[in-house]
Image: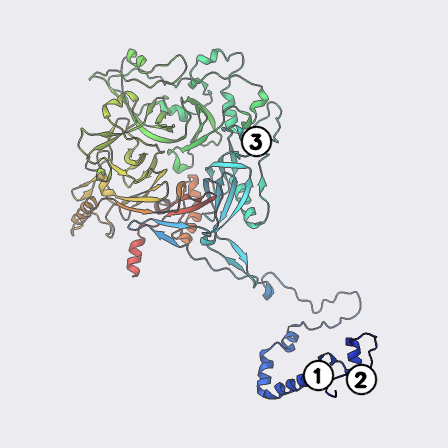
Amino acid sequence: MESIEQDRLPTLSGDDLPTYDDLAAQEGPNSRFGRWRGWIEKRAAERYLSITPDERQRRRERGWGNEEMDALDPEPLTPTTPGLSIQTRHLRISTLSEPPPTARIEPPLPPLPPVSTVLRPTHLKMHHFGSRFLPHTTTPIRCLLPLQAGRLLLLGHDEGLSVMDMYPQEWNDSGGIDLKGPDEAAVHTIWQGEIVFQMSILELDQSSGVVLMLVGPEPESPLAKDSESRTVRMYNLASLTSLAKWAVANKGAHPLELSNFAAQQTPTKKHRPTSSFVARGLKSLIPPAASSSSASGSSSSSAMPESSSGGYQALLTPQSSISGGSPSRQPSAIARPPPRTNSDESSWEMVDDLPLRVLSFALWTREEGARMGSRGQYLAVATKNNILLYETPQNERAFRFVKEFYTPLQPKAMCFFQQTVHDRARSSSDSHSRHRRSGSHTTSSPRSSSITASSNTINYGTQLAIFVIFEKKAGWIRLADSAVGEMELFENGTEAASPTSLSAHSPHHGHARTASASPSSLRTRHGKHAGGKWLLPTRCELPTRSVYILTRGTTSHVVPCPLPSNAGPVLAVLAWRSPPAHVAPRLGVDTGVLQLTALGEGSVEVVEVPLAALGGVKNGHLSPGKYGNGSGLGHAHAPGHGHGNGNGNGKGKARMDDGLAALVQGPVRAEEDAGGETGFLCVGGHWDDPHQGALSLQRTASNMSGRSMDSVDSDELVARIRREQGIYGWCRKGVTDWRVFWLGGSFDSDDEEEEGE
């Protein structure tokens, strides 16, 4: 009974078990441990004594002490002299040139170039921007416009307008700025609720610029019930740049909401001057109510106002005279569309109120006067059944309406191109039977009549025309006389294959192909034509000539520019593995190749054609083919060889051997899987060397406005920079995953890598 521990005092609370307070009163503050208290204190003393003083000091230095915390505490401020007066004896003025050390911002290091994928054995490189896990947009990307030498990219898509910041900046922990590269590019939304279909630079100068946009409501918007409710608007380039910078600086801000912008617009007063040239042009086509019935039988060319500039009238003048005289030619116009009813004056003040909904537009800058900054422009606006032509006279900025063309089908796409026109004088009866109009005011194809051998040839030189793509066919409309025709790419089995044709790589081996832009009556003699979907022609400037790339289906033809009116052998024929959506040309002068890049479903395909294969080799020089001008392609040579003049020391023979080797080698092909469907956006960018490309473009930005240069070297530098530009494209990696990528690269990069090795 003695070993049993008992309470020496009765419980103060009256309960059976003592409380903590009772134990503290009996045994002290550690009474809760009971009989284990002595053992715990003993073990604690043993552990303390087992540690040497050196080990104890080492542990104290390693742990968190109060010395470090006391060192970080600011020293207490000494009390100043009492009073409200300001003491200035010890005042120190800090200027902007001497900021405090904690506020100094070091300049960020330049980011590394983006990682590229080389499509060997070609010279093409592919660059991807941003995180590979985050999409750039969740809807299809329609267009792209680079700003500030490519530092900012405006993206037009089905949800609105966004900006991609290629060099995002962030504050770091030390108070500085971290500059990231294109591999971490970020996308910020500028506005929502209004789709941006097209963006083009209408005017660009050092201090100002104008951007032409085709916009429309979102599919979910109540305004989108009309599938053709699209409008053309002009935006100030500086304002768009400011909006883009605002979206980048305010990353978490809500974008502008434009879904209800058009619905909230109210009709304005009558005769209010409007700034929309499209509204003024369309309004001028509506005749007065009293003369609407009599105007239905007039030609559409009569709608051109008398104040039109001489720029369009100059197209009607032949370039060479006719030997022996010729009858006067009157311009023939396409038949007018069905008559439209007039409406109230106030309903024509805004473009949104017009019944003619804009589907697309195309721009063309006239080449004459380019070096004096006085270039004129043509603007073609496509509606459901019409194409409206506008022009800006030289040294003027306002667009003026010129002519209206009627199309029997809805245009899907269009662009301007040049063609040569050679006609023959004929009697008045032949001229009358050549163009016929139906009673329903529809356009009939011109029919050629019999031509005698003694007919005199009229040379109208190079004329401007509009290339129009419909659902299954493509046609052209000449601006000067409104003549029309159907485009075809033919396969002629009766003629021998052209020496410059690359038909060995075509599925139709052994047949020369011909490109025709002639009237439909001349199409029957060419035989079978290549089928497939038409693409808009693209132009490329070779060293001694200009060429067009005509593509239909899986076949592309390299044809001379301007396009001959009569069919003839082409310079080259290429076949793609799958039908492309766009074919973009690039010229490598130093390596002597023409690079063609096809964007389509699931992959990017590139073909590099030697320039020697386009013109052949003659007398040790690279000479043009049938459509050449006789000057030769003297600057083209095979990869890995320098320039030569063909005089002495075997250089002429070496150039001939290089040309023959290029002919034997043939085109070089490569293909890269982009991860989904791809498409073309615009030309631009030097992301293989972004620092040099950005600096060069900033220094020569004024050249885009057409101003003259001070020296020939500057012209050559600008031409080289533009020639080495790449292309921007879009890729669809998922249902809601759309990305932007870039294709390009220098043509002499392989030589530099070999020298570095």
Element assignment for label 1:
helix
Q: Is residue 110 left or right of residue 243?
A: left
Give 421 or 46, whichever is nearer the viewer: 46
Residues at marks 2 and 1, CA–CA distance in whole angstroms: 14 Å
Q: Are marks 3 and 2 in contact (CB under 8 Å)?
A: no
Task: Name the spot of residue 656 as percent of width and height, x first.
Answer: 17, 46
User: Can you say which quadrant of the picture contains the C terminus?
Assistant: bottom left
Amino acid type, mark 2:
Arg
Amino acid type, mark 3:
Pro
- Can residue 708 be seen here? The reply is no
Q: Are marks 2 and 1 in contact (CB under 8 Å)?
A: no
Q: Is residue 196 left or right of residue 122?
A: right
Element assignment for label 2:
loop
2 is higher (above) or lower (below) than 77: below
Task: Name the spot of residue 352 as percent of width and height, x first.
Answer: 55, 28
Q: Which mark is residue 8?
A: 2
Give 242 or 225, whichever is nearer the viewer: 225
Nearest to N terminus: mark 2 or mark 1: 2
Task: Name the spot of residue 238 as percent of width and height, x first.
Answer: 53, 42
Q: Which mark is residue 35?
A: 1
Q: Nearer the viewer, mark 1 or mark 3?
A: 1
Asked which quadrant contains residue 454, the reply is: top left
Disc tally is 3
Nearest to N terminus: mark 1 or mark 3: 1
- Crowding near the residue tagged with mark 1, few <14, some 14–19, many ≥20 C-alpha atoms within 10 Å: few
Residues at marks 3 and 2, CA–CA distance in whole angstroms: 91 Å
Residue designated by label 3:
222
The colour mode here is: rainbow
Residue at image point 57% right, 25% down? 349
Residues at marks 1 and 3, CA–CA distance in whole angstroms: 85 Å
Nearest to N terminus: mark 3 or mark 2: 2
